[in-house]
Image: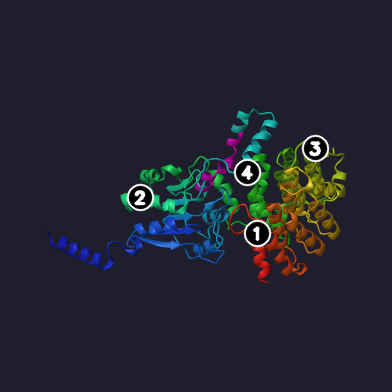
Amino acid sequence: MPWSTKLSVVLSAALFGLLGPVSAAERQTVCSITVNSADEIETFRRHLPESKYKFVDLVERGRSDWLASACQAKVSCDVLVISAHYDGGNEFFSDRLEVSEFLTVTELERASCSGSCPSLFAHLKEVYLFGCNTLNPEPQSSASAEIVRSLVRDGLTPKEAQRQLQSLPAAHGESSRDRMRQIFKDVPVIYGFSSTAPLGPTAASSLNRYFRTQGDREIAQGRPSNRLLEAFAAFGLSSARGMTDKDAHAETRRDMCQFADDRLSTATQLAFVHQLLQRHFGEARLHLDRIQRLMAALDDRERQTPAVAQALEDIGRDAAARTRWLEQARETEQPTVRVRLIDLARDVGWLSETERRQELALMLRELLDHAIVGVPEVNLACSLNPSHQLDGLLATAGAVHVRDDVPHAGVRACLGDAAARARTIEALVGPSEADVRVAQAYLRHRPIVDPAELRRVARTIAGMEAGDAQARALEALARQYVSDREVLQMLTALFTRTPSWSVQSAIAAILIRADRRSLAAPQLVRDLVAHRLPAPVAGDNIIDALIHTLQSH
């Protein structure tokens, strides 16, 4: 062996001895975002040697801006493991009450698009998404269906409408799979589930089996592992590649980043919104959530800055876009979506507050013309009128066909109709369970605050025949804050004489929330203990909780 070769071998051996088998610079960084189960990342830790991998948990407990903190620290991930429940569109979250951390898709988009976070995802080779529907290819909102219906109303066949929908760039960002591909741009491998994901311990078990046979040889290689997919075959694990600039739908990511990139000024983002509003209605509809978040973030001070004021003025003066938008809003079948479209028209300057009220009146009149309404419509009407600002609105919308049933009365009651309110509350003591649910929904928004009215209702309920109907009526009262001594005495007397355990349970639910200053606690405890009926199922119940609460005060 030549002397130079020997020297090279000696130096290499010495360097190897100094640095170890893998230098620190060559170690792969495994980042984790754990907001639910830690089982998955702990399995990675057990099987990936420290000499080759270092682990960084991006979540800082008790800190809300932990992802931004990771960006500022210039963390660079080679592998990312996210363990959390996923709602299919907007948020990764935990089902544990003690965990307050969560991760919004909006924050991931910001990290992906913004110059303030250049390194976090820039060198990713693999992403593991341990959450339900994280790579579901189906649209996760109703926007696509609404657009198809609007196109069919315009004269297209359903097949033509579907084809037209697919020509809209934003339609290719509707599914969870599309959104993850946009966020993790250029990442060679993204793993996720097309439907229900396994729980943490089950996922860890599958990972253990995989690592025991494969070790770490496939980790951070940037290639899909058929063996890993097979290990999770029972749960529908799939893989995808992050979007690239050459992707057929790369413009969908560019549009998304117009909202997410924090380097862009508000005026620039509003100019882009104007472009969307000038395109096919479906484009803006598919970005409606993002547009509304942008508008909601504008305070009065920012609206008055010259650039922002000019951008809003440009949108407000666009009569053609305004006409198209309002026409589409009036054709929208889902009332909740229609309200959002109307509100956006107000926010961009296309409707005054008076005009918004008129649009809402038109929508509510059409809603009351429907033969069937129910709890969702009552909730909508009441939520639109929390301060009674829409009371009497229907009188300005033209004649309304009055249907004499409880659901329609509930909607009218939400809009200030006194007779309809009485009709709705009467339903509490009626035989129809569906009508009771409507009355309960109404009272959640419009609780009984008049003592005389509460006494009348309580007296009527107390006079009902014992059974499920009476229990349902009492459950509605349980949502009221009862402080009237006469009502509480009436309910206590009913507790002592009813033959129904479900009625007693419903009464206990009222008393446990009631003003305790109006309760004669020692006597009440004696009555509860003396007259309580055996529970149908053994174990603690609301009556036990009430007795314990009274005795401890």
Q: Which residue is mark 4?
A: 286
Evaluate whether residue 142 shows in this view: yes
Q: Are marks 1 and 4 in contact (CB under 8 Å)?
A: no
Name the front one of labels 4 and 2. Answer: 2
Provide the residue designation for mark 3: 369
Query: Colour scheme in the image?
Result: rainbow
Using the image, tell me which numbered label, if any, was put on residue 209.
2
Circle nearer the viewer, 1 or 4:
1
For the residues labelled 2 and 1, the Cα–Cα distance comes to: 46 Å
The disc placed on residue 307 is none
Q: Residue at x 79, y 43 (%)?
A: 406
- Residue 167 among those drawn in magenta: yes
Which of the image's four quarters has the C terminus? bottom right
Name the residue beneath numbered marker 1: 542
Judged by its main secondary structure, the magenta piece is helix
Mark positioned earlier in the residue sequence (1 or 3): 3
